[in-house]
Amino acid sequence: MDFSPVQAMNPVRVSAFTATCAAGPGRAALGAALRRADSALRPNNFTGLPLPTFIGRVSGLEAQALPPGWAHWECRNNRLAWMALNQDGFLAAAQTAISRHGPARVAVLMGTSTSSIGASEEAYTRLSNDGQFPADLSHPEVHSPHSLGAFVAHALGAQGPCMTVATACSSSAKVFAQAERLLRCGMVDAAIVGGVDSLCQSVLFGFKSLGLVSPQLCRPFDADRDGINLAEAGGFALLERTSPGHAHLDRAASELHLIGHGESSDAHHMSAPHPQGLGARQAMLQALARARITAGQVDYINLHGTATPRNDEVEAAVVAEVFPGTTRVGSTKGWTGHALGAAGILEAVITLLALQGQWIPGTLNCSRPDPLAGERFQRMLQREAADAQLSVAMSNSFGFGGNNCALLFARAGQEPS
């Protein structure tokens, strides 16, 4: 395959980051869960109709309230966004960046696959006799694919470019690439990136209709894997240009950089990856080229690893072909479930936590690695959490339609030259 040359990029500072999912609110809860050998997934208690599966539901979200005067933004997805924004000091960090750079110089770039469609579902089930939405859901701000991006910009007071990316499971990974381009072109001085997806009926039963939902706990890269566990999550990162004079930022977070990204589209099938993983390979090679490093310099890869038969087969083959046997790889969806449009930011945060804490998460529920993945991949696969010296790590997000994104992160001062 002929890969177009890509422009090398300067590192982008990850000044703050956070994620909230079924494992709990914030980075500490997520990191602690990944160290334990038990899943945050629970039997489905969300749908009114029977659907035997496990889901990753965020605890306490029903009781979460938006600030007074924000009733027109009220929906499950925006409540999850607000809960996530209020973890790990992220809200204060974002507001400080907006104050420092100016509201018009800070972008808000959000990824989601369904936005607040759950509110639209509810509105249609409660139509009045004359076909009108109920008063508490008659707010156009909620019934829009751009609801998430508009809500986050409103919540933060940012006035720069505001976009919502909806490319299925790669959505909140692609916003990192979008942010790097805006920073490089000088259009903004900082970007708040992230993603939120909440559970709703159309997502759960839509994936069920595709035959992709497992009735058991998902088993990434296991020989007996049979599908995904759906989940909700919200996460954010603050990206700024690397430059001196940032000593006021939290030291632990400011040591991390985005050093590369790659994007591609298979254009092969609506829901299945290319059989040879051409788009996935292209995204990873682009990320390496932008970072000006070789595959052998990547210490850890957080794989997309959905636990569907085809996705894991293709991703395992491509990763084993591109990277050496010394690169450690694994999927964390056994803990968190598949958060769809929020999977990219959730797993980017996990990758940043691994770099920050110098450890590698395992691959939960993979008791018998698929022999079809090959001996090399089986040697690369990290099945249990372990301490490790990490300088560079990658996060993969591959969505429907073969929409792929790979992100490369590094500890500051340890980026390969």
Image (tube, rainbow, N blue to C red):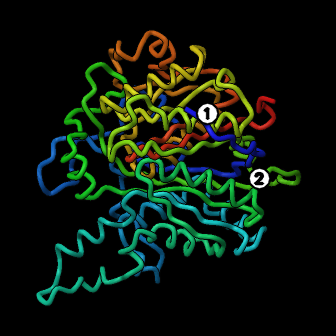
- Are there few (<14), some (14-19), or many (20+) residues within 10 Å of tag 2? some
Q: Work out whether mark 2 precedes mark 1 in sequence or the reverse, and give the earlier one.
A: 2
Residue placed at 36% from the left, 29% from the top? 38
Which quadrant does the C terminus fall into? top right
Please provide percent x and percent y for residue 24. Answer: 44, 46
Question: Which residue is depicted at the point 32% across and 30% down?
Answer: 310
| Quadrant of image for the N terminus | top right
- In front of the other: 260 or 96: 260
Mark 2 vs 1: CB contact within 8 A: no
Q: Position of residue 292 (x, y in %)?
A: 74, 34
Q: For the residue carrying disc 1, how many other residues have a C-alpha within 10 Å: few (<14), some (14-19), or many (20+)?
A: many
> What percent of the width, then of the height, locates residue 122?
23, 70
Is residue 53 positioned above or below 373 on the image?
Answer: below
Badge 2 element: loop
User: Residue 249 bears which disc, if any?
Assistant: 2
The residue shown at (48%, 45%) is 265
Seen at 61% across and 51% down, the residue is: 176
Is 120 left or right of 382, judged from the image as shown?
A: left
Residue at the outermost front position:
2
Q: Nearer the viewer, residue 196 or 287?
A: 287
Q: Which mark is residue 285?
A: 1
| Residue at the farthest bottom position | 130
> Which image quadrant is residue 130 in?
bottom left
Callout 1 amino acid: Leu
